Amino acid sequence: MMAPSRLSLRRQLLLWLLLPQLVLWAGGGLLTYRIALSYAEKGIDQSLTQSVRALARQVKPVGSGLLIDFPKAAQDVLEQDPDDRISYMVSSPPGQFLLGNQRLPPPAQPPLVAGDPVFYGGVLDGRPLRIVALDLSYGETSAPQILRVQVGKGLAVQQRIARELVADMLVPLLALGVLLSLLVYGGIRRGLAPLTRLTAQLENRSVNALSPIGMTQAPSEVHALVLAINGLLDEVARSVHQEKRFINDAAHQLRTPLAGLISQVELAQRETADPVLGARLNKVLTGAERSAHLVHQLLTLARTETTARRESLDLAALAREVAREWTPKAVAAGVDLGFEGEEHRTIQGDALQLREALANLIDNALRYTPRGSAVTLRVEAAGAQTRLSVEDNGPGLSDEDRAHVFQRFWRASEQPGGCGLGLAIVREIARRHGGDATVEPVAPRGLRVVLTLA
């Protein structure tokens, strides 16, 4: 048997529709952040190119030397922002410090082509930098020299711009994603509504309600499922009908010859004086009566395995009437049969089936309790439900026997007359009335069978 999936169809659809959306949103955010960094880096590179060329113009060759015209005010402007500080260094020849910050990292792959700025990354005082290096030629032709100008700028502004850009793009996308998720959830819920209605129809049906399911408005896939279920229900209904017809036919066919056999055996017993033959005829009579009782119980079981015809009835009045009908047999068995409980208790039930259940319970009590015992019928309210019980002060049953008492064809005693179907029929009738049947021990001795009816 296939194990049931832990995820419902609705959750699986939501997972497979929303998970790719989440992955795409996260991937789009990462890609947007990378693009934002790239564009911010281009802006920084452009700013650094202007800065390094402006700084290079302040270094003027004079003969074989250099004149650096870099006033203190300009230096303060470059270094005034601690978060976006611009560091610079002038060296000639490259690497021999002249001006600026001597700790500014050199380019990774010198020498450089004079006049072409080279960009690279570095770290200064624990801060990541974007650095540009520009080499310039100066001096006389006979003694050429190289001047290197480096300008570095922190990446804090670049990263802040990238984050702001990503936030400005992803927040609206997130809002749209939430709206899309709500629309997807609503669409899935609406699309699965026919399955929900189908489930409700199946859950609200009784066990024996095998009529076709009707769904007029549903997608084609659900219509196909309904048609398949209706086909299965039709086959099950046909099979159940054939089975019940066989039981009814077989039981009816057996009742007539069994009744004739019992009559003939009783006549033979009256006409014979032979004690040996009389004992044998008595065994035949006992077997025939048990067979007749079994046939009757099978017919009752076949009738109870259908939906109960629920109508308003007074259960207390019905119990008193059944008790009066069984009083002669109780007197003959030496048992005190009585009724206790409410004067009137109206329920929705099948009078014929409830009468059969009481008859089985009283018959069991009279059959298995000794002379001088008492059997009591009770009808009492239990909240919104009704308790119908038959109690006796006979020998009762052990805990092990009580666990099997409702099994079909199980008998706690080999006493003649029973067939092991009475209490199974009682429980079936109780369940047809929306309740159940239980057995309880009675102190100091005895047994109580309780039907809880809705």
Image: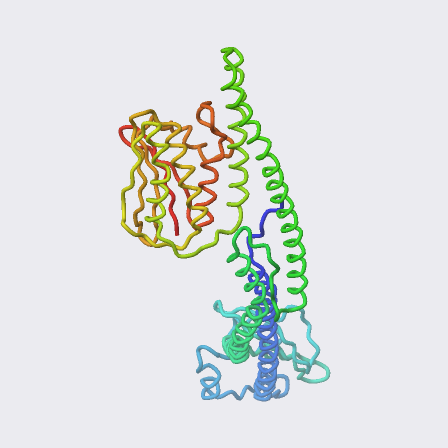
Q: Reply above or below: 415 against 44.
A: above
Quadrant (top left/top right/bottom left/bottom right) for the N terminus? top right
Total number of numbered labels? Answer: 0
Residue at left 44%, top 26%?
412
Residue at left 52%, top 61%?
200
Estimate the x, y position of residue 380 in percent, counting from the top left: 30, 47
Tell me the quarter of the picture where residue 53 sits. bottom right
Q: Reply above or below: 301 against 416.
A: below
Estimate the x, y position of residue 345 in percent, counting from the top left: 32, 52
Residue 182 placement, left or right of 243: left
Residue 21 placement, left or right of 269: right
Q: Reply above or below: 116 against 345.
A: below
Tell me the quarter of the picture where residue 384 sits. bottom left
Q: Reply above or below: 279 against 82.
A: above
Estimate the x, y position of residue 176 in percent, counting from the top left: 54, 77
Colour scheme employed for the rendering of this structure? rainbow
Asked whether 99 or 302 is in front, the reply is 302
Estimate the x, y position of residue 424 in percent, counting from the top left: 47, 38
Is residue 282 something one can see in this rendering?
A: no
